[in-house]
């Protein structure tokens, strides 16, 4: 694991964007695994800026998002589909046909999950996977548990995650109780992983991810088993990491 501690959120976001841009410049048809949440917002802003300045071109890029809420249609403002278009896809030139986000509103969600993994495989796997981290160490929506699912699957969100994510909804009752998430093996199969964390509320989760034992009870700790992980954190998120 390579850890880089940046001065603040802005610097972390700029660094993350430059890593993605380098990936796309070196391999224009990269398959990018993308994440949502508040953490990557600054990275998407910077990437849009770089695209507008002609520093990067996404015309051959294919994207696969990590997760989506069950029950929220693509046009629901809190869906991850909406988030991705609102914060990134509307402003850059990733072709619409190259954008993959699991649909949480189909009747047969098992089939959606199966097809999603199949498509990732058909495209030759993910070159660079961006991840945020939950306060409880979840990545995507792989929640702490005594066992974790390998492939894309439907997951029951735990109370802490529902509570954390309720800040985006009018009321906690509006937060979906289930989501579709890429599984740990889908994530671990990515060639490279880029994990971002900002703020002191993430310090404990980052400490356990980097210095803690490898356990499914802290899904991000499994990243210690991957050979090419870069972790970008700001000073607040880094403050519990032992030297
Ligand atoms: N499913 C998402 C994760 O992919 C994200 O990493 C996490 C942290 O979000 P934030 O960046 O807003 O703290 O929250 C959500 O639950």
Image (cartoon, rainbow, N blue to C red):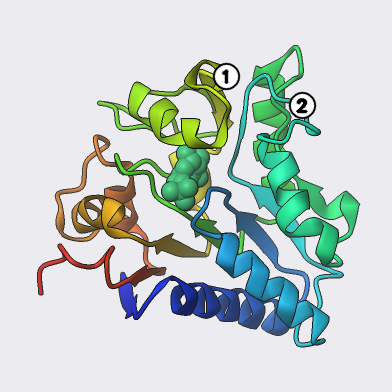
Which residue sits at x=31%, y=27%?
Answer: 147
Q: Disc number at residue 73? A: 2
The quarter holding residue 129 reads bottom right
- Mark 2–mark 1 Cα distance, whole angstroms, equals 14 Å
Give yes or no for contact between labels 2 and 1 (Cβ–Cβ under 8 Å): no
In terms of depth relative to the viewer, which is nearer, 69 or 11?
11
Q: Residue furthest front?
A: 170
Q: Is residue 224 found left or right of 62 in the rendered image? A: left
Q: Nearer the viewer, residue 74 or 78?
A: 78
- Does mark 2's beta carbon lie closer than 8 Å to ligand 1? no
Seen at 71% across and 50% down, the residue is 84
**Residue closest to the far left:** 243
106 displayed left or right of 225: right
Q: Which mark is residue 157?
A: none
Within 10 Å of disc 1 (Cα), the crowding (few <14, some 14-19, many 20+) is few
Q: Position of residue 110 (x, y in %)?
A: 65, 19
Q: Does the image show residue 123?
A: no
Q: Secondary structure at mark 2?
A: loop
Q: Tell me residue 8's x, y (percent).
A: 38, 75
> Is 232 situated left or right of 115 in this image?
left
Quadrant containing the C terminus in the rendered view: bottom left
Marker disc for residue 174: 1
Is residue 129 visible in this depiction of the protein? yes
Q: Name the residue: 37% across, 23% down.
A: 158
């Amino acid at each position: 694991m390579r850890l880089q501690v940046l001065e603040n959120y802005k610097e972390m976001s700029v660094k993350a964007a430059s890593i993605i841009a380098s990936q796309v410049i070196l391999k224009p048809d990269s398959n990018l695994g993308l994440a949502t949440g508040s953490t990557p917002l600054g990275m998407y802003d910077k990437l849009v800026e770089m695209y507008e300045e002609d520093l990067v071109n996404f015309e051959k890029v294919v994207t696969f998002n990590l997760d989506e809420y069950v029950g929220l249609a693509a046009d629901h403002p809190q869906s991850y589909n909406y988030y991705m278009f609102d914060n990134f896809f509307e402003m850059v030139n990733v072709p619409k046909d190259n954008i993959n986000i699991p649909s949480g509103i189909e009747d047969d969600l098992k089939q959606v999950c199966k097809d999603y993994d199949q498509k990732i495989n058909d495209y030759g796997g993910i070159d660079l996977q961006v991840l945020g981290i939950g306060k409880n160490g979840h990545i995507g929506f792989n929640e702490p548990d005594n066992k974790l699912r390998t492939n894309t699957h439907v997951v029951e969100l735990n109370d802490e995650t529902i509570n954390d994510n309720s800040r985006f909804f009018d009321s906690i009752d509006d937060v979906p109780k289930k989501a579709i998430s890429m599984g740990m093996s889908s994530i671990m199969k990515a060639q490279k992983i880029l994990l971002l964390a900002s703020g002191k509320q993430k310090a404990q989760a980052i400490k356990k991810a980097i210095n803690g034992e490898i356990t499914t009870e802290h899904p991000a700790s499994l990243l210690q088993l991957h050979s090419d992980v870069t972790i970008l954190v700001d000073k607040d998120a880094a403050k519990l990491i032992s030297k």
